[in-house]
Amino acid sequence: MKKTWLLVLLAGLALIVAGCGDKTMKAPEDPNEVLLWSSNEGRPSWTLKEPGRDDGKMFFIGRSGNMATEQLAINRASIDGRNAATQYMGTLVKTKFEQARVDFGLSSDVVNPTESSREYTKHLATNYVSRMKGGETYIEKWQTPTGIAWRAWSLMNVPEEALEASYSATAQTLSQDAARKAKEQSDMIAKAQLEKAGDMWKKMAEQGLFSD
């Protein structure tokens, strides 16, 4: 069965790497600020891209904001990129879990998409996001009314197989948990719901994160 919601979510994602080569844009002008230096002649277009998929990877943009030193800006951009990955994937997975819950006719008491997606992001952050790699970094040095400010953008990526691995591991854990609760449940209606939930999680683990 096609997951229309997933197609809608992913259809609007721009491919960050494709075509970003020599495309640049001017930094926004502010009469109270002066751009003193930049690592490129113009700000790369990828700095404004949204999360996207390309060549077996997902890409996320980290932004530092104003920082006191160049290194702090680079570090902050990397942290922001990892946070962006965790938040984006958590929202995507929560939506997928909610759709599955509705399809299986389960109540939110039996399957809580919010709590389940938190399990996913926890697993993802612990095992993969902390090791995300940066592809490109763009840096600017500004003179502002309060002093020198460094700003950095980082184009970061994580393999889709890592996202899938966390997804499958989460679904398998939730399936086992539902099966355990079903065995312990004496109420037949509640037991049946938990068994159905176990089947749902098992099916989701088999289908994968990016399946239709």
Image (spheres, helix red, strand yellow):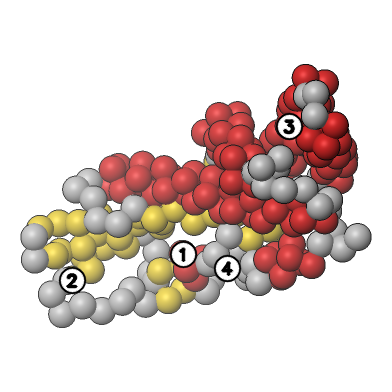
Query: Which one is in front, 188 or 96?
Result: 188
Q: Earlier in the sequence, mark 4 or mark 1?
A: 4
Give the tally of numbered discs.
4
Crowding at label 3, few (<14), some or many (≥20) Cα neighbours within 10 Å?
Answer: many
Q: Earlier in the sequence, mark 1 or mark 3?
A: 1
In the image, what residue occupies the spot 34% across and 53% down?
64
Crowding at label 2, few (<14), some or many (≥20) Cα neighbours within 10 Å?
Answer: some
Q: Earlier in the sequence, mark 1 or mark 2?
A: 2
What residue is disc 3 on? 174
Q: Earlier in the sequence, mark 4 or mark 3?
A: 4
Disc 2/disc 3 C-alpha distance (Å): 53 Å
Q: Position of residue 42 (x, y in %)?
A: 39, 71
Quick one: SS at disc 4? loop
Disc 4/disc 2 C-alpha distance (Å): 26 Å
Q: Earlier in the sequence, mark 2 or mark 3?
A: 2
What residue is disc 2 on? 34
Quick one: SS at disc 1? helix
Disc 1/disc 3 C-alpha distance (Å): 37 Å
Q: Quadrant of the C terminus?
A: bottom right
